[in-house]
Amino acid sequence: MKCPSNAWEEADLLAFSENKLEAPQAARLSEHLQSCPVCRTVVEQQRAVWKALDSWEAPAITADFDRRLYGAMEHATGRWNGWLEPLRLLLARQGLPIAAATCLIVVAGVVSLRPSDSTIAPSAAAARVENLQPEQVEHALDDVQMLGDFTRAARSETGEL
């Protein structure tokens, strides 16, 4: 909230209501509050909130508070444990076979849904042919030969045939 006259920020008004402003600034704001009903209302409401908070007394903790708290926590977790215990036993004994069977079913489904190569029309296969320049072919063959030489050299260094 800003003062309609833009003279004071909300942080200043809150600090004033807590008596945390320095004396010169507090005096100027006090003068401003005489003429600005909006700022005066904010300060009065904030002071009412602080007064209510200061007068509030927290209820005393009963002697059996810890026992009741831990009992409620045990009851809440016990409910979930009752539901999950059969699942835990099943997974402990048969978890690996179930996981393997599930993976096998998923892989079989993916493979069966993949289109086979026989469904591609001959015209589509012919459309894949690219025109290559002789220099490109020569460079590719040189690269293949270089990789073969590198592989033979690496194997001879490690003692493999």
Image (spheres, helix red, strand yellow):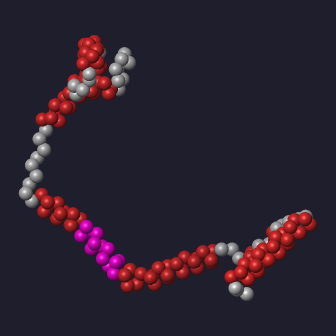
Predominant SS of the magenta segment: helix
Q: Is residue 11 visible?
A: yes
Q: From the viewer's perspective, is residue 36 above or below residue 87?
A: above
Q: Which image quadrant: the C terminus?
A: bottom right
Residue at position x 34%, y 78% from top?
Answer: 88
Report x, y in % for residue 94: 40, 84
Q: Which residue is drawn at 87% across and 65% down?
A: 136
Residues drawn in magenta = 77-89
Q: In this view, does 150 lie to the left or right of 51?
A: right
Residue pictured at 70% horizontal, 86% vertical = 160
- Residue closer to the observer: 72 or 109: 72
- Point 86% across, 67% down: residue: 139
Image check: 69 left or right of 155? left
Task: List x then y, in percent, for residue 58.
Answer: 13, 44
Pick out the residue farthest to the bottom.
161
Residue 145 picture location, percent across and down: 83, 75
Q: In this view, does 157 lie to the left or right of 12?
A: right
Q: Does the magenta-highlighted stretch encompass residue 50?
A: no
Residue 87 among magenta residues: yes
